[in-house]
Amino acid sequence: MGRIISFLKIFGTYSGKNHIWVLALAALIFLAVKGTKDERRIFVWPVLCALCVLNPLTVSLIPDSSTIGDRFIRFFWVLPFYELVGYTAVLLAGKCRRKTGRAAVIVLTAAAVVLTGNMVFFGKDVPSYELPDNSQYTDDDFIALKEILHADGIERPVVLYDGHLMLTYRMYDPSVRSVFSREGLYRLTTMTQEELYASDTQKAMQLIAGFYYYHDFSIPLESFEKAAAVKGTDYIVTAFNSPLNEIFSEAGFEISGETSLYRVWKLPEAPAS
């Protein structure tokens, strides 16, 4: 049941306020009633969808560690709606004897698709993509981060940063080592803060994750510093709106540099014993 609810949430996310699924359902009904044997072959897709995506038994077989769930549902359930509607419109137009009738079918179908609204991935809330104009053709923040993280001459600096940077920046600069591995980050996203503290995760990693990711400031800053030092952390990257900035600033952490989106802090060296 939980997976069915998860599917419905994902479907709702990608459908948004778009009602293309209504046209798709109407297209299937039309093909079932008026379609020929060959034209009804399009039903192979809904049958596969019902067996794979909507079947609780099949979905339950997908391992919890799988990260393809969202994409699987998006491409096999949402995107084909447009293909189905277009396919049915062409068939319907072909059944019209007059050119005016064919044109009317195409125009009305196109208008209906437009009126259903934009899907989330085409919506106004999605930022437009523009190719960076620098010679590397990459994000300007990545270029700036690389300069900052290598400014002190550390060959392979260990960096604590958020999950987005872990999955994107490291593709640009693989020489940087992350405090958390991708597997470790995935574990963080699949457990609550209480589950983290009760798990068998290393104590140092619990302290780092609790303070940095969960913003559990009941953890003393000194404990976080020691844990980060144990993991060999050289730099900590924070977004400008992160509450960690004020804490690090008040504690006297040194700012190594800033980009348009991020601030890079240098972890204080542990005092000599």
Image: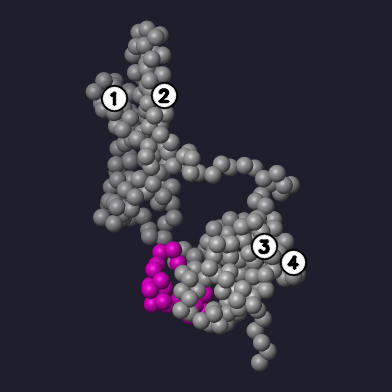
> Residue 200 magenta-drawn?
yes
Q: Is residue 268 above or below residue 42?
A: below
3D distance between C-alphas at marks 1 and 4: 64 Å
Checking the image for residue 258, the label placed there is 3
At 69% from the left edge and 68% from the top edge, which residue is drawn?
256
Question: Picture quarter containing residue 172?
Answer: bottom right
Crowding near the residue tagged with mark 3, few <14, some 14–19, many ≥20 C-alpha atoms within 10 Å: some
Q: CA distance from mark 1 to mark 2?
A: 18 Å
Cβ atoms under marks 4 and 3 closer than 8 Å = no
Give the main secondary structure of the magenta stretch. Answer: helix
Q: Nearer the viewer, mark 1 or mark 4?
A: 4
User: Residue 28, position in %: x, y?
Assistant: 29, 29
Q: Is residue 3 above or below residue 256?
A: above
Sequence-wise, the earlier of marks 1 and 2 is 1
List the residue tagged with mark 2. 110
Judge depth for marks 2 and 3 and give the one in front.
3
Q: Is residue 89 left or right of residue 128?
A: left
Q: Amino acid at mark 2?
A: Ala
> In the image as oriented, which residue stretches furthest toward the left?
33
Label 3 SS: strand
Amino acid tagged 4: Ala
Amino acid type, residue under disc 1 in the picture:
Leu
Nearest-to-viewer mark from 4 and 3: 3
CA gap between label 2 and label 3 equals: 48 Å
Q: Which residues lie in the magenta part?
A: 188-208
* Residue beneath disc 1: 31
Residue with the most extreme bottom position: 273
Q: Residue tagged by mark 4? A: 151
**Which quadrant is home to the N terminus?**
bottom left
